[in-house]
Image (cartoon, rainbow, N blue to C red):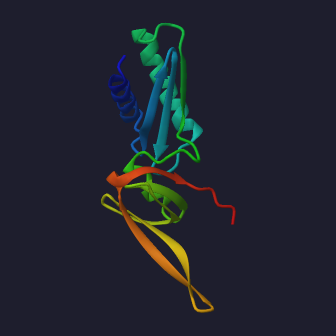
Amino acid sequence: MQPLELENLIETGLAALELHDTYLVNVRVKNNKIEVFLDSDTGIDFIKCQKLSRWLEAVLDEKKTFGENYILEVSSSGVGSPLLLLRQYPKNIGRLIEIKYSDNKQVKGYLKDVQGDVISVEYETKTKEGKKNIKSIITEQIKFEDIIESKIKISFN
């Protein structure tokens, strides 16, 4: 089964299970191991992963697509995993994010907004004027297509 066929099958499964807020982020197939990574607009949980896993397993077993000896793992894309789809950004508004974009530019700040395909990140800079440190709040606007990699950073404060 080609990756695109597997992606289409997963999309069919999500629709059949009425998991409309859940979407495929990535799928990897190596030898007999299939890894499916999901995300959701409202949050991914074990039940959603389990439902899709059971649905997929039934279809793959019936068609014998990967034979009888394969490993299927369905999970969330995970904390710290790169954001790969524009759809992943809105639910992360307000969180600390690090983005590499364009010609190796990098910004770390708070995801403030997503308008169309433009992501807004707000961060603080400090400049020295004489003996005073001046703080400024900068809002950087980055087109999704210019993003090389972005990750939500875990903040414990």
Q: Picture coordinates of residue 110 (x, y %)?
A: 52, 66
Rendered view: 41 above or below 22: below
Rendered view: 103 above or below 134: above
* Residue in the image at 69% along x and 66% along y: 157
Q: Is the N terminus in the top left, top right, bottom left or bottom right quadrant?
A: top left
In the picture, measured across the screen, residue 112 lies left or right of residue 102, that is right
Q: Picture coordinates of residue 89 (x, y %)?
A: 44, 55
* Residue in the image at 47% along x and 46% along y: 40
Rendered view: 142 above or below 2: below
- In this view, the residue farthest toward the front is 130
- In this view, the residue farthest toward the right is 156
Rendered view: 72 above or below 14: above
In the picture, measured across the screen, residue 39 lies left or right of residue 119, that is right
Q: How many marks?
A: 0
Q: Nearer the viewer, residue 78 or 39?
A: 78
Q: Picture coordinates of residue 7 (x, y %)?
A: 37, 29
- In this view, the residue farthest toward the left is 116
* Residue in the image at 45% along x and 23% along y: 56
* Residue in the image at 52% along x and 59% along y: 97
